[in-house]
Amino acid sequence: MPNLADHLFRQARERPDKIALIYEGETWTFARLADAVRRVAAGLAAAGVGSGTRVGLMTTARPDFIITQQAIFALGATLTPLNIFYKRADLAHVITSCDLEVLIMDRDFVENLPDAADCGELRGVLVFGLPTGAGRLASADGLGQTGAAIERPVDLPETAIGMMLNTSATTGKAKGVMLSLANLRANYDRTPEWLGLNSESVILCALPLYNTFGLNQGINALMVTGGTMVLLPRFDADRCLDAITAHGCTFLPMVPTMLQRIVDHPEAETRNLSSVSRILTGAAPVPAALLERIYRVMGRDTDVMTAYGLTEASAIVTLEHITLRSDGRIERPKSIGQVLPGMEVRILTDDGRPTAAGEVGEICIRGPNIMQGYYRQPEETALAIRDGWLHSGDLGYFDADGHGYIVDRKKDVIIRGGQNIYPADIEDVLYHVPGIREVAVAGQPDDKLGEVPVAYVALQPGCHLTAEALIDRCKQELAYYKVPAAVHFLAELPKGPTGKILRRGLKSPATNASPPGVTP
């Protein structure tokens, strides 16, 4: 019977002295990590954590997160990683909607802890950085110092809920996504193989650890392969370049905005980045200009992969190996790839009809990786999973060769006077304008037309563009009804934890301000 911590304990047996983790100059072997997990698990058990206990974990990206995560797994409890940027209302919603029983958090986040009356079934709060307990808070610092240690992870049925992840909330209120051990093993266990990772891989993880990207392509990839992970507490382009050159990092799992900042760094082309052989990106559109820049900085032989996935499908569903042709052109730069083994994907129309190649419809997924449902939300679950198919809410199509393409989110389609507008069509035109760093298009209510498209743009440093120039560009390349009614310039576009641009945050009047020196 499986346990999600089995991979770590296997690595500790097979390669105990191999360096597993590098963090802020400190190294952890697999044996040291497994020993810490045994001791922390014993401390958690003494605090009342056991099989099926619903545990929230809210810490920064550091070894404590990984050790505590693996200890929670080892005990058979259900882990809910929490976004470290949650404020009081967000935290209250997740605690109550997921019925969390124990919360483990950093001292810096205690100020956002809701009142006890708003915490539902929460019966214990363990805090890192708290020397002694105070009121309902207990110290988490001594969890591994009781002198006790578990022998091995508990055996669990495949149906046990290993993690209850929160949707990214780009689609509204976060929901608890129940992922069973069978779901996770069907995807997480196979992801490193799909990505070409092995025990020699050196993973640079600058991702947050509370979402599926960091959990799967970071921690899980480390545990399954027995490679090495260089963990950064937060993303910083300077530190990423330093880590690559110092530790010979071979694999970079990053969202496009991270990669953009690395390849645009003034020292990017003078540093020795030849160790990087694989890059995985996704969670947001990847502009062709960024792909071209990656190859120029990292080298033509770099295996750049783009993927499509979602929390409800236990992570990735399709994978594309981007091809740089001999003439310098990128083949299928917008593709999200082909469907991975063990999964099925259909593109369906609104009335449930399968589409032909090239025809746009909703991406629907079926397979052993599909979630058990949204916790305590049967109506939402029934809407999402119909006849065994997970309806993603994303619009896309497959070409005749089976390569997939995302068009947009179903709910992001703008309807202008009865004409459907996909924001990605406008964004693609604007991304080809030199000097544009980021762009997003959202619908704005209009009394006569219902909605009109509005573009929000972040520029490269030192670049000056006008709204009129960008609108003229769109007029040259797009149908009249797709031309933005306005262009607003922002210093940064609002993003969620995975790097996705939050379109709903673009519709606030507060986002309409332009940075100094930029003409709206």
Image (cartoon, rainbow, N blue to C red):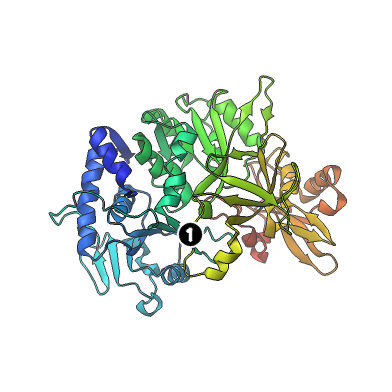
Q: Nearer the viewer, residue 17 or 111?
A: 17
Q: Looking at the image, is 423 positioned above or below residue 357? A: below
Q: Nearer the viewer, residue 199 or 391?
A: 391
Question: In which quadrant will I find the C terminus?
Answer: bottom right
Residue topped by disc 1: 372
Label 1 sits on a secondary structure element that is: loop
Q: Looking at the image, is 479 positioned above or below residue 169? A: above
**What kind of residue is marked 1?**
Gln
Residue 45 coordinates in the image, percent (x, y): 22, 61
Which image quadrant is residue 264 in?
A: top right
Residue 92 coordinates in the image, percent (x, y): 43, 71
Res 206 seen here: no
Residue drawn at point x = 32 percent, y = 38 percent = 22
Residue drawn at point x = 29 percent, y = 49 percent = 67
Residue 509 coordinates in the image, percent (x, y): 67, 65
Which residue, as the protein is rendered here, is positioned at the far bottom?
Answer: 117
Residue 62 placement, left or right of 428: left
